[in-house]
Image (cartoon, rainbow, N blue to C red):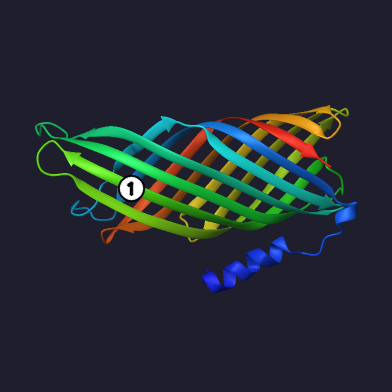
């Protein structure tokens, strides 16, 4: 995969593609997302020394902020999407019998996902199939405190930053002048172990440039990092409903 000094200029080039602003359709949409979030972690160190592994290290429902921007003219368009969340949770891992051991986990995760790309719509209209291509930057700041029932607590911290190329498609169906239905799916690859993004929504134009969008989004982000020199694979899963306020002009 291209190094960072190649990827960043590519992202800037996508964002600064010449565009006729006067003839374009613009959209800005802030969203409130209420997904169930789980964070799983597995270690390549089978001996377990130096790493913390387990399912649902963090597992709760949390409010998440999303922001989407689009500009389109005829067959081509630009799109940007931003997700940010701060998550803190506690869980307990228990050893199998006959061992009578438990491990309390206190975890914190700060996650930012930035997506910049373009889309092509063969019909040249809002309705129909759109093909998506772009870059997705994922930044994760993770802190885990492991407190065993026997022994002293251990703290594991790391920052991860990965960049992927994403490919996907979406379908928009218009029902009259006020209603629309959208399906989207895309998959990214590169620095991460793979990122899946699925979305379904229904939109209502309320008055003038204002509208509402109600839907469901499922995203799975998997990446590899290192904690105290031990390779770890982290999987973040987010699934839940969202409500967006759409402004078109």
Q: Nearer the viewer, residue 172 or 109?
A: 109
Mark 1 element type: strand
Q: Residue at x 73, y 43 (%)?
A: 28
Closer to us: 235 or 106: 106
Which of the 4 image quadrants contains residue 230? bottom left
Q: Residue at x 48, y 59 (%)?
A: 162
Note whether residue 2 is visible.
no
Mark 1 neighbour density, 10 Å: few (under 14) some (14–19) many (20 or more)? some
The quadrant the C terminus occupies is top right
**Residue at 50%, 52% in the rendered image:** 194
User: Which is more toward the observer, 172 or 228?
Assistant: 228
How many marks the image carries: the answer is 1
Q: Quadrant of residue 16?
A: bottom right
Residue position marked by numbered label 1 in the rendering = 143
Residue 238 seen in the figure? yes
Q: Is residue 181 left or right of residue 157?
A: right
| Residue 190, image x, y percentages | 52, 61
Residue at horizontal 49 percent and vertical 37 percent from the top: 238
Q: Taking 53 as reference, is 18 left or right?
A: right
Residue 156, image x and y in percent?
A: 27, 51
Q: Position of residue 119 (x, y in %)?
A: 74, 53
Is residue 196 positioned above or below 200 on the image? below
- Residue 153: x and y in percent read 17, 44
């Amino acid at each position: 995969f291209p190094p960072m000094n190649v990827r960043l200029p590519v992202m800037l080039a996508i964002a600064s593609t010449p565009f006729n602003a006067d003839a374009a359709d613009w959209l800005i949409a802030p969203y409130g997302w209420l997904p169930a979030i789980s964070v799983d972690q597995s270690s390549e160190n089978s001996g377990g020394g130096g790493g913390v592994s387990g399912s649902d290290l963090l597992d709760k429902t949390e409010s998440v902020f999303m922001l989407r921007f689009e500009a389109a003219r005829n067959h081509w368009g630009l799109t940007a999407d931003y997700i940010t969340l701060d998550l803190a949770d506690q869980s307990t891992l228990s050893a199998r019998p006959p061992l009578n051991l438990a491990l309390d986990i206190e975890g914190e995760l700060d996650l930012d996902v930035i997506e910049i790309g373009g889309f092509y719509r063969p019909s040249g209209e809002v309705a129909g199939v759109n093909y998506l291509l772009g870059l997705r930057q994922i930044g994760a700041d993770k802190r885990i405190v492991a407190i065993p029932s026997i022994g002293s607590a251990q703290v594991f911290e790391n920052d991860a930053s990965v960049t992927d190329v994403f490919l996907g498609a979406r379908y928009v169906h218009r029902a009259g002048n006020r209603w629309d239905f959208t399906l989207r799916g895309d998959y990214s690859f590169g620095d991460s172990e793979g990122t899946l993004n699925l979305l379904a929504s229904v939109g209502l134009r309320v008055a003038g440039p204002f509208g509402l969008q109600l839907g469901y989004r499922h995203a799975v982000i998997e990446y590899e990092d290192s904690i105290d020199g031990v390779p770890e694979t982290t999987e973040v899963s987010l699934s839940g409903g969202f409500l967006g306020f759409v402004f078109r002009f």
